[in-house]
Image (cartoon, coloured by chain):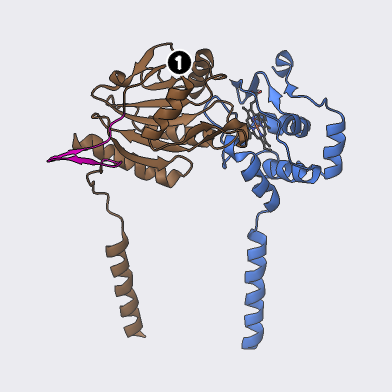
Amino acid sequence: MSRKRCAWIILFLVGAALIGCQLPYEQGRELYVSACANCHMEDGSGLAELIPPLNGSDLVRRNPDLLPCLVRYGMEGPVTVNGITYNEAMAPVTGLNDVELANILNYIQYQWGDPDRFYSPDEIRRILKGCDSRPVILDFSAEE
Amino acid sequence: MKGYLFILTSLWFLYLVSCTPTDQCQTLPILGNQDIQGTDTLYPEIPDFNFMNQDSQEITLATFDNQFYVVDFFFISCPTICPKVKKQMLRVYHHFEKEPRLVFLSHTIDVRHDTIPRLKSYAEGLQVDTDKWHFVTGSEEEIYQIAGHYFSVARKDESSPGGFDHSGRLILVDEKKHVRSFCDGTDPESVDQFIKDIQCLLDES
């Protein structure tokens, strides 16, 4: 093999590796950092028993359909995540359109929840149509 | 080739020697403008205050007699930096959990909403010890005023998210009620240094 060709192949491999290493949902990550990380922290760990974690949250994994409504309209009342009950209100997160909402939730699922769960903007719209436009209150007895 | 290698290694060595931060303690300065009167130098001190904590206990400067304390300003419904700052404050708290000479003081700047029962459940949510970490409320004016003595900002501001403007600083006060160090509570690295400062001050006295 000529030297030149060999150099090209190496360049190609390095390039492919670089692209492969990039995180999907880059916009989702940026939006997450600006809209959610103040409370849920950049690593999704939450705050003690005041703000629930998203990282490893059983609610995120098991109730993915709840998430769009919860972010758009906020949440009140007790919520149990991984066996710990939290009870501070989450204000509605304003200023996110449906595509941005899909991006954030895809990032959260990919990074900390169910990596195979994917929301398309159309699905987000469909789910949002089905929820009341007021803060989500979980029925505590149904949670158990 | 060998020559290059030698130069590189020596450069690397120089870098290691000169740029590795030392963990040695230096005496922390007393912060604020000093006032020189004759032969005396007067340093600013935290003035007395009168607040109530999450257990309805009166908290005054005398509460911190012979103790060092760390201060911050926050409000429970804060949609911006407060939870981040609290997470860092909690880190400092856990670091010095077994150190009886250091206590913590958080002031709410939203006295209307953050009532004593709400402060109580907040403290419980953080799972901290009431004797070691006071969450206080009181006269709005007194809280906003005392913030200045801690080199912090706390005030109502309609244009800020949540309705309040405030800085996310953690402030260290010594047993003579002088401010000795502060850090940016939103920046974990700044808090690392702050923890070192606290340790130095405790070791010194």
Q: Mark 1 lies on which chain?
A: B
- Quickly name the residue at label 1: B54
On the image, the x and y values in percent for residue B40 come to 14, 38
Q: Inspect this view and state whether residue A25 appears.
A: no
Residue B45 colored magenta?
yes
Going by the numbered disc 1, the residue's amino acid type is Gln
Q: Magenta stretch: dominant SS? A: loop
Magenta stretch bounds: B30-46
User: Does residue B179 lie above or below A79 as drawn?
Assistant: below
Residue B195 colored magenta?
no
* Quadrant in which residue A52 is drawn: top right
Rendering colour (chain A): blue
Work out which residue is located at the far left of the displayed protein and give it: B39
On the image, the x and y values in percent for residue B45 come to 28, 31
Work out which residue is located at the far bottom of the displayed protein and give it: A2
- Taking the spot 78% from the left edge, 24% from the top edge, the residue there is A134
On the image, the x and y values in percent for residue A24 come to 69, 53
Query: Which chain shows up in brown?
Result: B
